[in-house]
Structure formats: C-alpha cells, structure tokens
Image (spheres, helix red, strand yellow):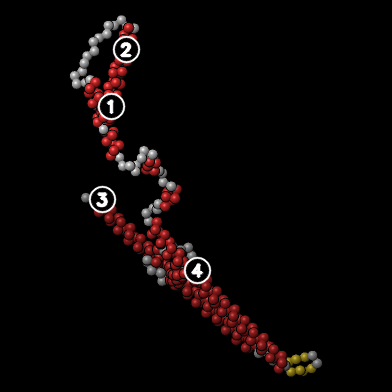
Amino acid sequence: MEEEKEEAKKKMRGAMAMAESQSQSQSLGWLTESSIMPKKHKAINGVGASSILQLKAQLYKSQEEAKSSKPPSSSSDDLPYRSVAKHKPPLRHDLFSHKNSGVDSRAHKDKLELKALQDGSLSYAALEKKAELYDKLVRGELSDEEEKEKYSVDFFRKGLEEDQSEQSTRRSDSYSEILQENESDDTAELFDAKLEGPGQTAAGVDKDEYKRFVREVHEEASQAREKASALKLRREEQAAARREKLKQAYLKKRLESLKAAEKKNGP
C-alpha cells in the first residue's frame, strides 16, 4: 500500500514539474509579444508543490477509503435504477384507488336505503304517513305542527266531492233496484192478467207502490243534499277558524318582533 502511494506521489511530482515548465514557456512566449517587462514571481507562504502533493495524496486516500468501505453488493449500475424508482410517478390504478372522506359511510347509507326500498318498507311507511295526513286534512283535524306540511290539493272540496259521488252512487243503485222490482212486478202482472176478449188483457197495475218508491228516492236525495250542505258548512267554519288562528299567531309574532325592536333601539 505504501509503495503504491509513493508511486502516486512520484507521478504527481512529475506531472507538476511538467505543468510548471509548460506554464513558464507559455508565459515567456506571451511576454515576448508585450512591451512590459516580466515581473518577478512572488512566492506565497505555505503554498507550494509539496502542499499540493499533500492535498492530492489526502484526496487519493479518502477515495480509497470510500471504495473499501462501500458494500460489495451495491454497484454503480444500481444507482440510476434506484433514482428512477424513487421518483417514479404513481400508476393509474393507484390514483383511482384513493377515496375521499365519508365515501364508505355514504355508500353504507345508500345500501340501507336501497334495501329498504326493495323490501317495500320505506314505501309502505311513506304511504301510511301520507294516508294519515290526507285523512286529517279531509276531517279538518290537522294540528299546528302538521300545518307546515306543503300540499297543493283542496281537501275540503275533495272530501265534499267524494261524499256527493257516494250519495249519487247510492241513489243510482236504489233507482236501479226500484226499476228491477217494477220490471219483476210487471212480468208477474202479465202472467196474472185475465183475458177479457180476443187480444185484450185486464192488468191491475199498482201505481200506489210505484209512487211510494219515488217518494222514498226523493226523500233520500233530499236528506243527502242536506247532509252535504251541512258538511260543507262545517268545513267552511273549520277553515275560517283555522285562518283566524293563523292570523292571530301572525299578529302575535309581529307584535313580539316590534317590541323586541323597540327594546333594542330604546335608551
């Protein structure tokens, strides 16, 4: 090892001497082209050929130590690969694999809602709630909290129309029954008719029974009309009372807001 160092020092000394001779010859050639006389070279304390040799020897020593301390498995060929692998951009599937916050919770909630929708429990509960609300609206028994529900149907008129349709249906059914009974009575009278002569019959038609049926239908229709008018009047009264209640509540809130504004702006 020491012999190698000595050889390196000798080589470096030879190189330094050659460089100095070249610089002197070059400077002399440059100075011959100028009219300025060359100045004497000033020596720098502590800097010379020996100090440069020491620095180069120290550099050579540090390089050898670095080579000896380097592990044998690592080679210079692996360095570019490692640097490239370190700064390798993420793949496309890695980009799409990232999830935002709250995605799992929302997905779980959507699954539960989908399951409830497929089972029919959600639709059944919504229909039950809607039917209950409609019944209360038709009867006029809606509470103050439920009045906040928005709807675009006149349930009072709807209920009145339903009652009238039911009454007309009952009236038509009763009228059809009367006609069927009259037809059966007419057929019975035809069979019971007595022949008085060639091509003549004497049928005793009971007109009082027919008049009685007509009177019953008329009374039934009158009662239905009275019932419908009473129901309409009652619903109108309920609507007026509800409007008055809403008006009073609005006036009360307005008065409270004015009082609060006066207190805030007062001395």
Taking depth in this image into account, of 218 and 14 the one nearest to the observer is 14
For disc 3, the marked residue is 265
Distance from disc 3 to disc 4, alpha carbons, whole Å, reads: 48 Å
Q: Earlier in the sequence, mark 2 or mark 4?
A: 2
- The location of residue 197, given as percent across then percent down, is 79, 93
Asked if residue 68 is positioned above or below residue 237 in the image, the reply reads: above
Left or right position of 179 against 119: right
Choose top left, top right, bottom left or bottom right for residue 194: bottom right
Q: Residues within 10 Å of mark 2 (few under 14, many from 20)?
A: few
Q: Amino acid at mark 1?
A: Glu
Q: Quadrant of the N terminus?
A: top left
Q: Regarding mark 3 in the picture, which secondary structure is present there?
A: helix
Taking depth in this image into account, of 63 and 8 the one nearest to the observer is 8
Q: Amino acid at mark 4?
A: Arg
Seen from this angle, which residue lies furthest right?
198
Left or right position of 237 against 164: left
Choose top left, top right, bottom left or bottom right for residue 7: top left
Q: Amino acid at mark 3?
A: Asn
* Pair 2/1: label in front: 1
